[in-house]
Amino acid sequence: MSTEKEIRKAAEILSNAKNVAASCGAGVSAESGIATFRDPGGVWEKLNPAEVGTASGLVNALNQNAARFIPFFIELLEAFEQAEPNPAHTALGELEKMGILKTVITQNIDNLHLEAGNTDVIEVHGNGFRLACLSCANTDTCERKELIASVKERLRNLSEYSLSTLSTLLPQCSRCGKITRPDVVMFGEMVKDIPRAFDVAKKADAMLAIGTSGVVYPAAYLPFEAKGAGAPVIVVNPNENPFARISDAYIPLNAGEAMPQILDAVKALRK
Ligand SMILES: [Zn+2]
């Protein structure tokens, strides 16, 4: 099957749909400069998630080797600071405006789907720029670049590392003034909004699975859920097709390359 033909098939499916769900993995953000966590060269090659993926693990790592960890964290923060929505995000935003795409289910915490104009985004790993109060139920949404600039500044000025000094890196709760944490899923914590993600997948009239390795829960299951309920499945993934058994169209390209081509093909069909 040629890639062109698969793009046409994807466009035919989408042009007839109005309740599409997109399940997005790290591959969607890779082209925005955010390293995928599991790929070679990714974050977990440099850091052991069991070591630093929890609040106390982070404190230990800093106390043992701040000289190694601080520059790494600053580099990581800067990747999130400099990131911009890429053509895949933009195409998904446009598919929503056209009344085709309804919900994005994403593993990414970078806020880029919301910035690209998608309004119904299920963030199963949370959002790095939303702060959750540890004392009351309040959450505060911060401007991404502003928040990172202030965290970097405070991080550089920390002289000792403990849970209480780390808590001063983030703004306090706007409602009660107490300590906040990023509203993201840390290592060992439960993923968020899973019942809703499965419900959306089940009710979708087509499913797009983009840039997902097919091994991370729940992204690995959502296309099967949609397919089981009768929806066609479109897979965009350059490396392999993790959903080979159930895909109705498979585009073996990077998300930022594939999605604008699919969008153009949908527009051509709708003319
Ligand atoms: Zn509070």
Image (tube, rainbow, N blue to C red):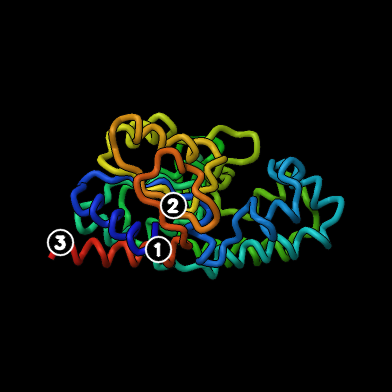
Determine if the C-beta at disc 3 is less than 8 A from ligand 1.
no
Residue 43's x, y, as percent? 68, 55
Q: In which quarter of the image is the C terminus?
A: bottom left
Q: Which amino acid does label 3 sit on?
A: Arg
Q: Is mark 2 on a helix, strand or loop?
A: strand
Give the Cα separation between the discs numbered 1 and 2. 10 Å
Q: In this view, does 47 lie above or below 89?
A: above
Q: Which residue is drawn at 21% across and 65% down?
A: 267
The answer to whether mark 3 and mark 1 are in CB contact below 8 A is: no
Is label 2 within 8 A of ligand 1 (CB to nearest ligand atom)? no
The numbered mark at residue 162 is none
* Residue type at numbered disc 2: Ile
Q: Residue 41: x and y, percent?
A: 69, 60
Question: Which residue lies at the image location 44% right of the left edge and 61% below the top edge?
Answer: 255
* Whole-number angstrom distance, CA of label 3 to CA of label 2: 23 Å
- Determine the residue positioned at 46% across, 34% down: 221
Image location of residue 134, percent across then percent down: 56, 37
The amino acid type of the residue labelled 1 equals Ala
* Residue tagged 3: 270
Image vertical order of residue 111 relative to residue 163, above or below: below
- Disc 3 element: helix
Residue behind mark 2: 210
Q: Mark 1 points at which residue?
A: 258
How many residues crowd mark 3 within 10 Å: few (<14), some (14–19), many (20+)? few
- Respond yes or no on whether mark 1 lies under 8 Å from ligand 1: no
Q: Is residue 94 above or below residue 18?
A: below
Seen in the image, is 93 located left or right of residue 88?
left
Residue at left 41%, top 34%? 224
Are the two marked residues, 1 and 2, in contact with CB atoms closer than 8 angstroms? yes
| Residue 139, quarter of picture | top left
